[in-house]
Amino acid sequence: MARQTGKEERLSILLLSNKSPFPPNDGSSVAIESMVRGFVAQGLDVHLLAMNTPKHPKSPSDLPEELQGHVELTMIEVDNRPFMGKALYNLMFSKQSFAVSRFDDQTYRATLCSLLSEKRFDFVQFEGLSLAHYLDDVKKQHKGLIILRAHNVEFRIWERSARHEKNPFKRRYLHIQAERLKQFELEKTPQFDALVPITEVDRETFKDLGISLPSRTAFSGRAFSTSVEKDSEGPARFFFVGAFDWLPNAQGMGWLIDEVWPLIRAEEPKAELHVLGRNCPEGFRRVSGVTIHPDRQDASGFFKEHHILLVPLRSGSGLRIKIVEGMSLGKAVVSTSIGAEGIPCVSGVNCLIADQAAEFAAHALQLFRETAFRRGMGKEARKTARNYFDRSSIGRSLIEFYKGLR
């Protein structure tokens, strides 16, 4: 539990995660890494128990030097690859959501129980619903506060993805999985002591679903330097960042390529779209003006090299970390309503929002052609990011919230 260091009380927290966030090279890793650094900045001792999966292979040596001594990282090898045979077996012989059942691992459970028997923590925080299988194990051994940090309203992602799926068999499968995930989410979430949604939109959604836990919204924060990022030289370049093994990214990018990009290229034949994301479909590589970049550890460097962030999501939930990253670096953003959901975006002020292909293309072209307008919007975006996404302020507010519930 809390330890006395002189007159100062040092609190301890155990974070449970389905991946290590080091290095933070995808959206959820950025969100978890931000939380870890926020807690460390507030003087907490942090123990992170993370799965190490084939999809997100990491190494304990990736823990940054400045966090060593403040963060204890334990990684458990978990092979949760979604093989077709496993998916079909789950569909036919199980009532559980395949999306979360893949994270139910006996070695991870044994390590968690052993850790809880050896150490005492003030708080245990679950980084996402996929770890909720371990809630009963934690309750048996931990008497302090147990928190669910909800990165999304999970079943909403599957519901929205099903709406945009053209294949009738796949659409039916997504509907089934969405319903199973909803049942799991509504069953498990109320069993926690507190809920930390990542946006106010998600917080209100949980309330509408009848979940009345004490809650506090905590955006995915970041640190800000005093220097201002400058546009890279040369003509403005569009860019997209996102892994294509996440269905909303694949669907959104398909819409962008099929319906939006031809409108942009018809007006500006030299326009370029640069795409960073693993498992990019081969068809995208053959589209004129589109360049696919190999997956990079330094996603922030990719942001800095380009100018106009396109976020064409038509499904999903939670917070689009890519928008937070872009805004914090002063990038102009064009997004759909769902893409910008939960972010304090005001279209025409700090971003541009459109849900129809023609309007989305028109916004993108305006930013491409009007340098002063693009830079002004980027400046407002960075100002918004500093006001809402400062990691230190978010961590401090969250710890005060937890202390008030003890």
Image (cartoon, rainbow, N blue to C red):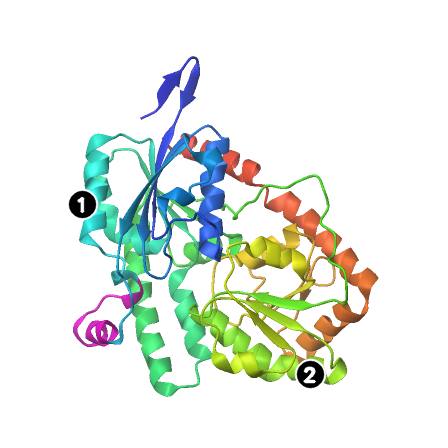
Left or right: 20, with 348 as reference point: left
Note whether 98 is above or below 193 in the view shown.
below
Q: Which mark is residue 110?
A: 1
Region rendered in magenta: 85-99
**Residue type pointed to by label 1:** Ala
Q: Earlier in the sequence, mark 2 or mark 1?
A: 1
Question: What type is the residue that disc 2 sits on?
Answer: Leu
In this rendering, the answer to whether 79 lies above or below 275 is above
Q: Nearer the viewer, residue 133 or 25?
A: 25
Give the structural element (helix, strand or loop) at label 2: helix
Residue 76 position within the rendered picture, expressed as x and y whole percent measured from the top left: 27, 48
Residue lying at 42% horizontally and 59% vertically, measured from the top left: 153
Left or right for 311, reference 210? right
For this view, does 298 lie left or right of residue 267? left
Residue receiving disc 2: 263
- Foreground residue, 143 or 20? 20
| Front residue of 269 and 208 | 269
**Is residue 343 visible to us here?**
no
Q: Where in the figure is residue 93, as x and y percent of width and height?
A: 16, 73
**Crowding at label 2, few (<14), some or many (≥20) Cα neighbours within 10 Å?**
some
Q: How far, Cα to Cα, is label 2 from label 1?
A: 55 Å
x 33%, y 42%: residue: 193
| Label 1: how many Cα within 10 Å (few below 14, some 14–19, many 20+) | few
